[in-house]
Amino acid sequence: MNWFTSLLVALAALAAVALLVVVPARLKPEQRLSARQRRRLARLLPWHRRLDARRWDRLCRRTARVLSELTVLDAEGQPLADNRQLAIAGQIGLLCLGAQPTETRLPAEIVVHADGAPQAPEPQWTGVIEDIGELATGQPWQTLRLHLAWPAVAAALAGAETNPVVRELARLQDFSAPMSGDATSQSWKNALENQRRSIVQQGGSAMLRPADDLDTDAFFGRAAELFFQRGDALARTHPELYALLAAYFDLETARSRPSGHRTPAISGQS
């Protein structure tokens, strides 16, 4: 066998391996919520009325992806009740509704405690997950757990000011992706950091007082929490920050948009 034949054999072998890896992934059916799950999700998430048909369909597809890839357990290690899993996955889907980061960090497991604050140490956030397709979730590199108390999750869905799902998951995003396809466009991270610095210099406000040493990720976690839970107040108090978050999430949470706000108008979704 001469060198040319050997080269052809090697290339053929590489092509065969590539087909074995790529083709099954492409043939894997896209995860979808059932009609019943979509109705339940609409009842669970108070923000669904702020989504038009296009955004609502996108949220359902992202929620289905999260459900298929993330393990959500109760404190006894058993699968969490379906409605509660759907409520948590739907909120994670909201975080991925608009602009996509280059990568995000997610726990391999979310452990939900039925009563009170979870008695568990703060997890070590070290597992980076590459962006796969249009949803920035994937298989984590190692076992990481996020502990949540269901009463706090339920209170957030009922309109409380705090939202542990949004706060803890949002602060793990990486925002190095540009804000647009323009090569001169700044990244989302730089835009958020500029907002953080501006608010620090202004002394903050009653609803948002970022410390000088607060990093951008922690600032975004708190800002995102306010965006989803106190959209109207955030739009009045920090209109530029609200407009930036609305553009990132492709979602309006305030009934009245700030002056000069350019995010597309939202039509109601029943």
Image (cartoon, rainbow, N blue to C red):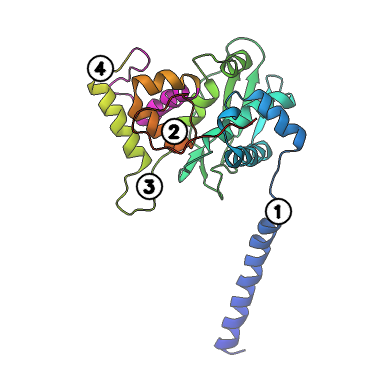
Please name the amino acid that badge 4 sits on: Gly
Please tell me how crowded label 3 is: few (under 14), some (14-19), or many (20+) other residues with Cα within 10 Å.
many
- Where residue 235 sits in the image (x, y, percent)? 39, 23
> Any mark on residue 203, and which?
4
Instruction: Name the image quarter holding the C terminus.
Output: top right
In the image shown, does 64 or 128 lie closer to the viewer? Answer: 64
- Where residue 170 sits in the image (x, y, percent)? 48, 30
> Any mark on residue 178, and which?
3
Please name the amino acid that badge 2 sits on: Ala
Select label 1 or label 2 by which is in front: 2
Q: Which callout, 2 or 3, points at the residue further toward the start of the chain?
A: 3
Q: Which callout, 4 or 3, points at the residue further toward the start of the chain?
A: 3
Q: Which callout, 1 or 2, points at the residue further toward the start of the chain?
A: 1
Instruction: Name the image quarter holding the N terminus.
Output: bottom right
Query: Relative to residue 119, is residue 83 depicted above or below?
Result: below
Looking at the image, do the residues carrying marks 1 and 2 touch, with CB atoms under 8 Å apart?
no
Please name the amino acid that badge 1 sits on: Lys
Which residue, given by chain and number where applicable, does mark 1 sit on? 28
